[in-house]
Amino acid sequence: MALPAHARLFDDAERTAFARWALRFALFGLTLLVITIILHRFFDMKTPLALNLIALVFASETAALVLAGLAVMLIWRRAMLGLPDVVVAIAIALAVFAWPALYAVTFFSLPQINDLTTDPSNPPAFQNLVNLRDPRANSGAYPGFDAARAQIEAYPDIRPIVVDRSPEDVYELARLTARSLRWQIVRNDPPRGDGRGAAAGYLQAVDRTLVLGLRDDIVIRVLPVDGGGARIDFRSASRYGLHDFAQNAARLRTFSKSYTARLQASVSRPDRAAPKPGKRRQRKRRRRN
């Protein structure tokens, strides 16, 4: 039985190699991305290696899009097979590129800074945290005047918190807030002494970004203020990259909001008068009866 003409046409058509390789590159990039995220987030892969692998992921997806374009040309002009592979390859590549595309608006609308603090004139110093940074990471030194001016223009709400409580209470509440946010506390130095000669309290911690698990350094400083109370200053800096995509500002805002809520919840309430032992016994007898 003779086959129809259109059936013979597709039976004799060749599958373009461009389509096969486009799908292979797309799947390779996607697989490498998933493995890199898992190894970096949960198995302590070195960050420079992870960033290099992610660059390879985007190179692979770019190759997939180029090969898919060549395959479409051959399929259109020579009636070759491979369209399903091309569609899948393009879908995977666009899905991978959609991830950085989500940050495009943030990248172009916000300044290129990676170190934020509530006290640009005297930023809290990273002490122990500097030793944890890879030699290829950003320096622990504050960037300086240009970064401070850009921060003030972009994030005018990033300011210190002044609390009318003792430095010890203010620091302890800050420590509890950091723990509630699941920051890894590296060093815990509560304030010591009274008056102007009191030593400031420093809390140094590490936080990780949601998807990649990139480590960012945080320091909280608690200083006594004249007339009573204490002032909290923050500093949050990215270990890698020139642009933090507003991650440090979001972290400081989250801490301020959480700290304020915890502070309001800790406002002392009038203690209820405790019942006397005799009255407790009378209540127990009534319940028995």
Image (spheres, rainbow, N blue to C red):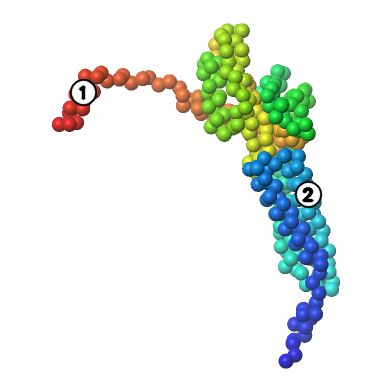
Residue 174 placed where, x, y %?
56, 24
Q: Is residue 278 visible?
A: yes
Residue at 25% from the left image edge and 18% from the top image edge: 276
| Cα separation between marks 1 and 2 | 76 Å
Q: Is residue 111 visible?
A: no
Residue 163 placed where, x, y %?
55, 18
Q: Secondary structure at mark 2?
A: helix
Q: Secondary structure at mark 1?
A: helix
The residue that disc 1 covers is 281
Residue type, label 2: Leu
Residue 172 placed where, x, y %?
53, 22
Residue 210 placed where, x, y %?
63, 41
Q: Residues within 10 Å of mark 1 (few under 14, many from 20)?
A: few
The residue that disc 2 covers is 56
Residue at 19% from the left image edge and 24% from the top image edge: 282
Measured along the vertical axis of the image, is residue 212 above or below residue 282?
below
Q: Residues within 10 Å of mark 2 (few under 14, many from 20)?
A: some
Residue at 52% from the left image edge and 15% from the top image edge: 166
Q: Which of pointers 1 and 2 lies earlier in the amino acid sequence? A: 2
Q: Is residue 186 left or right of residue 5?
A: left
Residue type, label 1: Arg
Measured along the vertical axis of the image, is residue 58 above or below residue 192?
below
Q: Is residue 34 left or right of residue 78?
A: left
